[in-house]
DNA sequence: ATGAAAGCGCTAACAT
DNA sequence: ATGTTAGCGCTTTCAT
């Protein structure tokens, strides 16, 4: 039990290097019969390679760290984090890489970066970092490779949706249906994706000459609860919009809940448009029309980029084109509406 | 950059042991002023402790492995896995432990256990292992500590819900409402929790003298799709039940979808009872009445048990008492029903 | 109080 | 073709 290469070497009366090369299949060649004997001895002695010892030498752990947006307590319960984590794990599996989820990255508001730099991982994937994320600047200064997802192109390399384009696609859709009175449920003020979407909406609305009102652009925190509050605020006073464009699917689900509760039919009375296309977009009634962000692809790209970074290559940020997924929550506006 | 304790020792002209003790605050005492100088030098030289080197000696990584039920491709997308993972991460965070998610544990149907035993983690939490899980027997033989969640008490220590009691509680509830014609949506035939629930249902139904029919007990695979198929089968021919008890919330959601689509009102025409009380139980319309399994608590217990195991203590399996969470999917059966 | 040195288990450069 | 050995960075025993 608990034997080492030394034990194998002793038993076979060969050197540890021979055992090592036999076990690893290189780089030095080992005669077939020796190799067989080593493998047999390893089996017999129940040899288990110690990854720590190996990595202490090779500086490779075949493990990547995943750093979460820590603004919420139950991080995995967020549909977005759930989905992107799943996508990343799928991609990691293809490369036989494992994932280290570092808990408690912050303490007393200060980032505990030591644990991110202690050699356990070859690199990090940072999920939707906040705009003032000190962790990123620390990682930047060290030599550890990392990529961000939904970092809004803040630093290189980052994998993000083209949020501006996504907003434009959404507005194209709503306007093609005849909507001109469109409210917007914003996200989180300190979240890159959210900021881009809000700015894009404002710019597009102005460029397209759409009506705007203060209560037609309300923060929704990217959450279902936030979406409920935002929808309530939007519908609290005239003028009323014929469509509500939500920054993400979660807030859209909240908005839908409020609309339904108020007896407002979706999409007959009011159209509702989401953003992301998470699985939850298909679990509402009606199903959400939404702007799809290719998160599966982005997760895969994050892993690939990180791998390249680890090999010393230069890697660039990528923007992923969103597209419309038309379902049941949008339709032409009702004909006789008074502001 | 990238300095070691050796660098600090050299700079300060002290021994590495002094530096080590100063940095760790023991076990050997170090004069205050020396300690201060070491800390200052560490800061200045940008010293980062190497966790691999440390753990090679101490045999402690402060990291626990999480082994998933690998029967599904997108493991984190399952509401159950998502929820239990979240609970575990919350518990780990309290103890400053990190989580290693090992991907690709199986290859060609053979468990790749080497990666689970290579020293990167201090122990494992195995999620809902299957009944023929070879991984468990391998872990058993090695000296690595591990606990299972929802292992159905198969091995020690295991943290599971008391499924039999849960079924009884559910039947008590339905019968107190007047139901006597109760169908059951089973789970997965090779899943411990599922087997227990199905067996308990059969035993209870028989003991309570409930009507049974072959098409009133149908596998639902623990999934929404499975729940849909099961519900369709149950409703495909008379006699019709007045209530459907589902093995978990996911299949209940699927069943609800089918019932709603068929124009059967829940709970007016048919009552629907779930099991687990995942967040999704509250996202349906009506919200699901369900048997709550304290997963948050079980996650915490898993971490605590593993910690005790790591300290060499003896740890026992625990059963967690489920309880009824009454919401909107169950009610008294309609009065005039013909079989 | 503190320094020297022996490992932890492995890889790989350097012999032979 | 294969053995010897110097590390990787750290903890900890043994001296002093």
Image (cartoon, coloured by chain):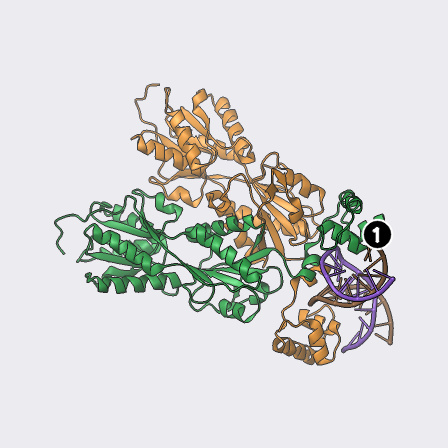
Chain colours: A orange, B green, C brown, D purple
In this view of the protein, which residue sits in the foreground, B319 or A117? B319
Residue B283's x, y, as percent?
36, 43
Give the residue at x 38% y 44%: A282
* Quarter residue A283 falls in: top left
Q: Position of residue C14 (x, y in %)?
A: 85, 67
| A148 left or right of B184 in image | right
A285 versus B227 height, above or below: above
Q: Secondary structure at mark 1?
A: loop
Look at mark 1 in the image and give the residue it sits on: B14
Number of numbered discs on residues: 1
The quadrant of the image that shows the C terminus of chain A is: top left
Indicate left or right for A211 with A320 as reference: left
What residue is shown at x 43% (from left), y 52% (from top)?
B295
Q: Is residue A22 left or right of residue A259?
A: right
Among the 4 quarters of the image, the one containing residue D13: bottom right
Q: Is residue A109 visible?
A: yes
Return the x and y of residue B113 as percentages of the image width and height. Answer: 56, 66
- Vertical position of residue B129 compared to residue A8: above or below: above
Query: Above or below — where is C11 with respect to A207?
Result: below
Question: Which quadrant does the N terminus of chain A fall into?
Answer: bottom right
Residue toward you, B285 or A88:
B285
Residue A41: horizontal and vertical position, in percent? Answer: 65, 78
Question: Label 1: chain?
Answer: B
Examine the image and state in which quarter residue B263 appears: top left
Q: Is residue A281 left or right of residue B287?
A: right
Task: Work out whether residue A210 can be spotted.
Answer: no
Q: Residues within 10 Å of mark 1 (few under 14, many from 20)?
A: some
B112 over A270 or under it: above or below: below
């Amino acid at each position: 039990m608990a034997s080492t290469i030394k034990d194998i070497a002793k038993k076979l009366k060969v050197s540890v290097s021979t055992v090592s090369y036999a076990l690893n299949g290189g780089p030095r060649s080992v005669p077939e019969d020796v190799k067989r004997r080593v493998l047999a001895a390893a089996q017999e002695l129940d040899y288990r390679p110690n990854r720590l010892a190996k990595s202490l030498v090779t500086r490779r752990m075949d493990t990547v760290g995943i750093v979460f947006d820590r603004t919420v307590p139950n991080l995995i319960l967020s549909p977005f984090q759930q989905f992107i984590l799943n996508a990343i794990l799928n991609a990691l599996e293809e490369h036989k890489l494992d994932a280290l989820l570092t808990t408690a990255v912050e303490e007393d508001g200060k980032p505990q970066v030591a644990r991110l730099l202690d050699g356990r991982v070859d690199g990090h994937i940072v999920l939707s970092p906040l705009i003032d994320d000190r962790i990123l600047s620390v990682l930047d200064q060290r030599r550890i490779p990392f990529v961000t997802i939904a970092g809004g192109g803040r630093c290189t390399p980052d994998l993000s949706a083209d949020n501006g384009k996504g907003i434009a696609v959404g507005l194209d859709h709503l306007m093609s249906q005849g909507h001109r009175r469109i409210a917007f449920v914003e996200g989180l003020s300190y979240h890159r994706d959210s900021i881009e979407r809000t700015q894009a909406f404002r710019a597009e609305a102005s460029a397209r000459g759409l009506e705007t009102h203060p209560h037609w652009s309300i923060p929704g925190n990217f959450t279902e609860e936030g979406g409920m509050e935002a929808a309530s605020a939007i519908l609290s006073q005239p003028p009323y919009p014929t469509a509500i464009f939500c920054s993400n699917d979660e807030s859209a689900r909240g908005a839908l809940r409020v609309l339904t509760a108020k007896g407002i039919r979706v999409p007959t009375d009011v159209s509702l448009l989401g953003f992301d296309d998470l699985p939850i977009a298909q679990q509402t009634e009606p199903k959400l029309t939404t702007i799809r962000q290719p998160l599966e692809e982005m997760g895969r790209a994050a892993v690939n980029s990180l791998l390249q970074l680890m090999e010393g290559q230069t890697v660039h940020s990528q923007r992923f084109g969103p597209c419309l997924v038309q379902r049941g929550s949008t339709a032409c506006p009702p004909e006789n509406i008074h502001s």
